[in-house]
Amino acid sequence: MTLAATYIRTDPEGALPGAEEQRRLVEDYAAGRGYEIVARYEDPGAPGKLLYHKPGLKEAIDNIKEAEDWEVLVVAEPRCISDDESAINELVHKFSLYGNALESPGRDWEEFLAAMRSYRRSQSQRG
């Protein structure tokens, strides 16, 4: 069985789905995939851009580096992590280095990886 964690972020502007709706989405997704949820991280009212300004997400990132309690982090949608695509790609890159995955009902791990690779290629071509 794949061990999973969930991540919920609500924002001050109310642009993201509410916490209960996100909880339902991630738990339904995990159940549909046969994942066992072993950790839950939340950042209520957190701003959208920077990864490390979200204590719950920072704890999840620290977990993949140290405890390795789970393999997949499930979010309701990518913008629940960050409003900034480069921040999402940074997280995907970090997860790929540690053998973890990020998934959402609308984007599986392979899609996250493909977007990250495309982003990294475009950045290297700019430099």
Image (cartoon, rainbow, N blue to C red):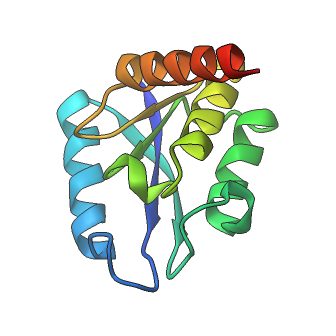
User: Is 35 in front, or is 22?
Assistant: 22
Q: Is residue 4 left or right of residue 107?
A: right
Asked whether the viewer can see residue 99, the reply is no
Above or below: residue 96 compared with residue 37: above
Quarter of the rendering occupied by the N terminus: top left
Name which quarter of the figure residue 111 lies in. Answer: top left
x and y percentages locating residue 5 in the rendered image: 49, 46
Name which quarter of the figure residue 124 lies in. Answer: top right
Above or below: residue 38 compared with residue 117: below
Above or below: residue 41 compared with residue 11: above
x and y percentages locating residue 32 in the rendered image: 17, 35
x and y percentages locating residue 27 in the rendered image: 27, 51
Above or below: residue 13 compared with residue 25: below
Q: Residue furthest front?
A: 126
Q: Is residue 100 left or right of residue 67?
A: left
Q: Is residue 69 left or right of residue 23?
A: right
Asked whether the viewer can see residue 31, the reply is yes
Residue at the location (29% across, 32% down)?
107
Quarter of the rendering occupied by the C terminus: top right
x and y percentages locating residue 81 in the rendered image: 50, 54
User: Is 74 in front, or is 113?
Assistant: 113
Picture mark count: 0
Residue at the location (48% across, 19% down)?
113
User: Is 53 in front, or is 127?
Assistant: 127
Residue at the location (29% across, 63% down)?
22
